[in-house]
Image (cartoon, grey):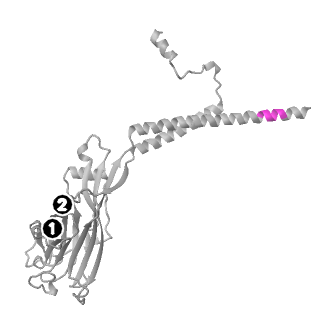
Amino acid sequence: MGAWAKRLIWLDAFPKVEHNIQDASRSGGALTIVVSLILAWFVYSELATLRTVHHAYAFDVDPTRSVGHRLQINFDVTIAMQCEHIRVDVLDVSAVSLESLQAEITKEPVAEFTAGNAKLLGQQVWNRASVDKMLQNAHAHKRPATPRSPKTDDSAAKACRVQGNIHVAKVTGMLHFTAPGHGYMGEHTSHDSMNFTHRFDSFSFGDVFPGIVNPLDNSLEIADSHMDMFQYFISVVPTLFQDKTRHWLPQLRHLETNQYAVTNYQRNIENVNMQSEGGIPGIFIKYQLEPVNIQVTQYQQSLSHFLTRLSGIIGGIFVTMGMVLKLFWTTVHFYRKLTASAQGYSHI
C-alpha cells in the first residue's frame, strides 16, 4: 500500500467496526428492512416533487400605465343585423370618439346568423393551457382558429361579422355597436331592422394565444326585442407569464398579455324615458384597466434543493431510528433487570 493510500486511511472520518465484534440480530435486520422501505418511499416522494411544476403569483403596480403605452383590443363578433345598420365606435375617458380607428375595423355580410359552437355567457367550457404551452404558442406566433361564416351579398345578408384589432390609450373607454340614428347623428334606422342578438367568437386585450381564457370567447346573447340594450362591464388586468423551467430557452420564458373579468346586463328600453332613465339599443362594452398587474411564475424545484432535502431526510431517518432502537433496547434491558430482581427476592 502506497504512502498516499496510508495517509487517506488515516484521514478517514468514518471508521468501520470490525466484523468480529459486530452483533447482528433479527430485530436489527427487521429494522433495516423497515428503514429501507421508509427511505424508498421518501425518495419516491421527493422525485415526484422534483418533477412537479409549481406556480407562484405576485402582484405589483402596473408600470405600463403611461402615455406612451397602448392597449390592443381584439374582437370578432357576429350581429343579427345587416352591416349597413351597424355603427361601431370607440370612446375613451375623455368622451372623444376615436374616428381614426375605423380603418382597423372590418364588416363582412353573413347569410344567416347562427349560434355555432357558442353558448350563453357563463356556460362555456374552457380548456386552460399551462404556462409553458402558452409560451410555446407565443413563440410560434400561433393564433386560435376562428370559424368562418358563409359570405353573401349585403342586400341578401341577415347578419354581419365585425372584426377589429384596434389600439387605444390605456385609459377607461367604451366600445359599442349601435344603429345609425340611435345615439348618433345619421339616417334613422327602423326598429324592425334592429336585432342586437350577437355571438362573440373572440374578444381579448393584448396579444392572443391559445390557452388564455377570455370570458367572452364563444359567448352568445339573444335579444328579446328590437330595442334591447346589452351592457358589458370589463375589468382588464395586465398579466405577465414567466417560465423558469426553461433555463436553456430564454426566448420562451416571458409573455405579456391581459386577462379580464366581465359582468353583463340586458334590458329592454322600448318604453324607457330616454331623458330620465337613458339607454340606447345596442351593444356597449365598457372596459377599465386595473392599476395592478399579475405575475404568474412557473417553476420547478432545483436539483440542489432536492439533494439538500434528500440528505436531510436520509440523515434524519437514520438518527431517529437509531434513537428509537436505543430507547427500545434500554427499555428491554431495564425490564429484564427488574424481572431478574423480582425473581431474586422471591427465592429469599
Foreground pick, 24 / 57 = 57
The single residue placed furthest to the top in the displayed view is 2
Q: Earlier in the sequence, mark 1 or mark 2?
A: 2
In the picture of the structure, the residue carrying the numbered disc 2 is 67
Identify the amino acid type marked 2. Answer: Val
Q: Is residue 115 visible?
A: no
Q: Is mark 1 in CB contact (under 8 Å) with mark 2?
A: no
Residue 206, position in %: x, y?
21, 60
Q: How many marks?
A: 2
Q: Which residues are magenta?
A: 336-341
> Magenta region's main secondary structure?
helix
Q: Residue at x 17, y 75 (%)?
A: 177
The residue at the point 78 percent across, 32 percent down is 337
Q: Nearer the viewer, mark 1 or mark 2?
A: 2
Quarter of the figure with the C terminus = top right
Q: Nearer the viewer, residue 277 or 299?
A: 277
Q: Residues within 10 Å of mark 1 (few under 14, many from 20)?
A: some
Indicate yes or no whether the magenta region holds residue 270: no
Vertical placement of 286 versus 242: above or below?
below
Say above or below: 270 vs 7: below
Rendering quarter of residue 257: bottom left
The three-letter amino acid code for the residue at tag 1 is Gln
Q: Residue at image x 54%, y 38%? A: 37
Tell me if I can see residue 50 in this picture.
Answer: yes
In the image, 23 versus 293, the foreground residue is 293
Q: Which residue is mark 1?
A: 163
Is 77 rendered above or below residue 222?
Answer: above
Coordinates of residue 85 in the picture (x, y in percent): 12, 79
In the picture, measured across the screen, residue 139 lies left or right of residue 29, that is left
Q: CA distance from mark 1 to mark 2?
A: 26 Å
In what element is the residue under mark 1? strand
Q: Within the image, what quadrant is residue 240 found in?
A: bottom left
